[in-house]
Structures are given as structure tokens and as C-alpha cells.
Image: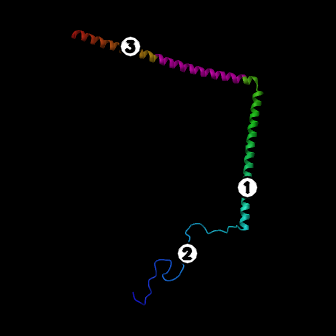
Amino acid sequence: MRPSEDPPPSRRRGRTVGFNVPRAQKRSRSASPPRRDPIPSIKEQLEAKYRKDEEFWATLSKERKERERRSEEQKRQRESTEESAWKQVNRDPLEVHEERRRGLIDLNERYERLRRSTDECIQLVKDLGRRTNAYNEELRDIRRGRQKNRDEQWRTHH
């Protein structure tokens, strides 16, 4: 290094040696936006008020429509129930008799189907019982025959 040259700049930020220089202020590295004025302007206050009013009226309107829809639905259901009750009370006796007769015929057909199905099941169980008895009888005969053979072999050898 030659005497006429300036020394290289310091790599470190902060105080320069020998001088009373304040440190460089640190910058905020947060991603938050710059601070707003803590007291909102009149325009912002009015906008916020109108926004709240609009939300309030929209909510009221929505609730009113929902209440009207429910009351209409209840009214239709009540009218339908009343109409069906009136029809039940004021029906033609022949129509009532015919409906009951059809119901009894349907019950009788259902009973017959169940009875046939039950008879088939009973027949299958009886058939299975006969086959099982025959199989067990054959098994007993085989065991008796083997026992007889063992008895004969024992007598002949002893």
C-alpha cells in the first residue's frame, strides 16, 4: 500500500474508528404495511358506517325472506293435512269398503306365499333328517362290522 492512497473502505457498518458518528439506524424488515393514522378520517368512518348498515339490512332482508318461505311452507303443509283429513272423513263408504277388501286380499296372498315357503322349508328339513338318519345307520353298521372283525381276530389269536 502506497502512502498516497486512501485505506480501503471498512467492510463493517457502524462506527468509524476515531470519530463520534452514530450507528446507522436499522430498517424494519417486517412485511407489515406502514402504520395508518390511529384516528380514521371522516370519510373512512362514514364508509365503515355505511358498510355496517348495508350488512345489517342485507341480513334483515335475508332473515325476512327465510321466515316468509318457512311460513308459506307451513301453510301449504297445514292445508294439505286439513284437505287429506277432510277427504278421510267424507269418503264414500263403498270406496272405503273396496279399499279394505283389497288390503285383505293382499294380506291373504302374502300369507299364502309365506305358508308355501314355510312348507318347502319343512319338507327340506324332513328330507335332510331322513338322509342324516340313513347316513348314521350306515355308519353304525360299518362300526359294528369292524368291531365284529376285531372280536373274531382276538378270539382266533388268543
Q: Indicate the position of residue 95 as horizontal and vertical percent values.
A: 73, 24
| Callout count | 3
Q: Residue at x 73, y 41 (%)?
A: 73
| 11 horizontally vs 154: left or right | right
Q: Could you tell me which residue is drawn at 72 percent across and 63 percent down?
A: 47
Q: Which residue is mark 1?
A: 56
Q: Nearer the viewer, mark 2 or mark 1?
A: 2
Binning the other alpha carbons within 10 Å of mark 1 as few (below 14), some (14 to 19) or many (20 upward) gives: few
Q: Main secondary structure of the magenta part?
A: helix
User: Which label belongs to residue 25?
Assistant: 2
Q: Residue at x 34, y 12 (%)?
A: 141
Q: Residues within 10 Å of mark 3 (few under 14, many from 20)?
A: few
- Which of marks 3 and 1 precedes in the sequence? 1
Q: Which residues are magenta?
A: 97-126
Q: Is residue 30 left or right of residue 1?
A: right
Which colour assignment does the render follow?
A: rainbow
Distance (Cα) linking label 2 and label 1? 48 Å
Q: Is 82 displayed left or right of 144 in the figure? A: right
Label of residue 88 in the image = none
- Foreground residue, 54 or 65? 54
Query: Does the segment drawn in magenta span residue 121?
Result: yes
Asked if the stretch drawn in magenta spans residue 79, the answer is no
- Location of mark 3 (residue): 137
Instruction: Evaluate if marks 2 and 3 touch, with contact meaning CB atoms under 8 Å apart.
Output: no
